Image: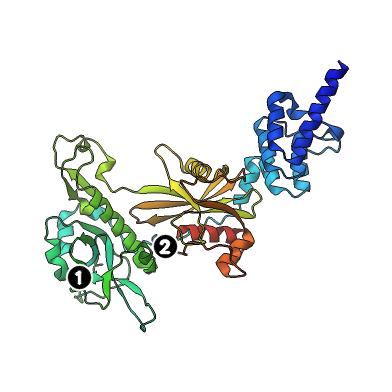
Amino acid sequence: MSLQLTVKEEMVERFLDAAARGDLMQVSMLLSQSPSLINHQGHNSWTALMFAARNGHHQVVETLLSHGCDKLLMNSSSQTALDIAKFWGHRHIANLIGCTDDHQRILLNADLSQQENYFGRETLDRQSEKRTDVVWLESKQCHPDSVYLLFSKLSPMVSTSQDDESTEGETKLCRFRYEAVKDLLQKPATVLIFLGVEKRGKSSFSSSQTVWEPPAWFAFSTDEDPVDLLKRCRENCCFPKTARRDLLKLSEEEAGVVAQARAMLAWHSHYSFCPTCGSITKLEEGGYKRTCLNAECRSLQGIHNTSYPRVDPVVIMLVIHPDGNQCLLGRKKSFPGGMFSCLAGFIEPGETMEAAVRREVKEESGVKVGPVQYISSQPWPMPSNLMIGCLAVAISTEIRVDENEIEEAQWFSRQQVIDTLFGGGKSAFTTPPRQAIAYQLIRHWIDMNSKL
């Protein structure tokens, strides 16, 4: 009997020592051999959880909690493991032991006031009730005040003013009148989208001094030679913007219009045929619906999402370290050198936004996420995504990158991020441009914490 007690005491000592040193492998092995070790108390009634909390061993604490250790046990000084973690300043350990209530506190300072992101400004009144009014739409299509935006293979025609040869000026959408494009509109394959009517004051295109009606805006795309399209432009330096980064040079007002128009035109370019039966479809409701011409097609029975414009939801999240003072950023091979961004991924069918955040972060970086908080969203017309921006609090910190998804992921301190955003020192990395919601999430976190 005495020998058995000596062996057990030795195992307890090894277990508590491993927890104090942060030896996760040893802790896990001993627990698998003797699960009863989990709540055993040693000298001064300290448990393995208390030792791990004292020394800030996050993974050991996480393992002990997952095995069901008792968080409420007290040592001879009437301290719990949570008390010990707080006393020694291990906030991330305290958050983990305190579970979601403490994790949630990291997000409580988030300012949830309305945030406008690039591509998100609603410049036009969409007037969706007019989409089924064929007579009204036809009258607006040939009205002299109506505005047409011309896309060359999904790239908007724009004009760029230049103050001198070395400086690129403001980028603006080329706006056409009906007479300038009516020959293109009359082609059978032309897809015309009604975008809405102007919200603000009198248009510069107004040809009448009578009662003012807001001009209607339309968009359409053509595969014609861009050189021929240039001849239609009254503005100087008119050309199609082809690169994605070029779309980020538009004003906030015009970016919102482009987001709507480009996403709609991209949808039509992929849905000329019915995805249910393969028959030809026709355009209806100002471009916001396609109807199959096969009378026997089951898409004509009930509501089917193949008949309406597609929007692909994407979660993009800034993951905050359990200590609240670091954030997780990753980079893809396609990124410019030194650039890191928020992790992101598509929401899968039957999945909530929060679940998608947790799954994508775990898949790409190996980090586990607890609380998730929505911040703001951004239309991203590449071709038709909705970026759902979130903050998320990590409950583990070890990074194991899935190299099929991203090239690298790192924890960056708040000071490193501040140096990058505001040039306060030598920057360790670069962020996406301010027009990207990733930048806005990073800036939001800095503002939330440091009140810059």
Which is more N-terminal, label 1 or label 2?
A: 2
Place of residue 108 in the rendered image (x, y in percent of width and height, measured from the top left): 60, 51
Place of residue 394 in the rendered image (x, y in percent of width and height, measured from the top left): 59, 46
Characterize the local packing of mark 1: few (<14), some (14-19) or many (20 or more) Cα atoms within 10 angstroms: few
Q: Please tell me which residue is depicted at 61% across the width and 70% down the height of the picture.
A: 424
Tell me: 134 left or right of 450. left
Return the residue found at the far top. Answer: 1
Quadrant of the rendering where the N terminus is positioned: top right
Characterize the local packing of mark 2: few (<14), some (14-19) or many (20 or more) Cα atoms within 10 angstroms: many
Quadrant of the rendering where the C terminus is positioned: bottom right
Secondary-structure class at tag 2: loop
Secondary-structure class at tag 1: helix
Per the model, the C-alpha gap separating discs 2 and 1 is: 30 Å
Q: Please tell me which residue is depicted at 48% across the width and 59% down the height of the picture.
A: 115
Give the numbered dot on residue 118.
2
Residue 144, visible in the rendered structure: no
Color encoding of the figure: rainbow
Give the numbered dot on residue 227.
1
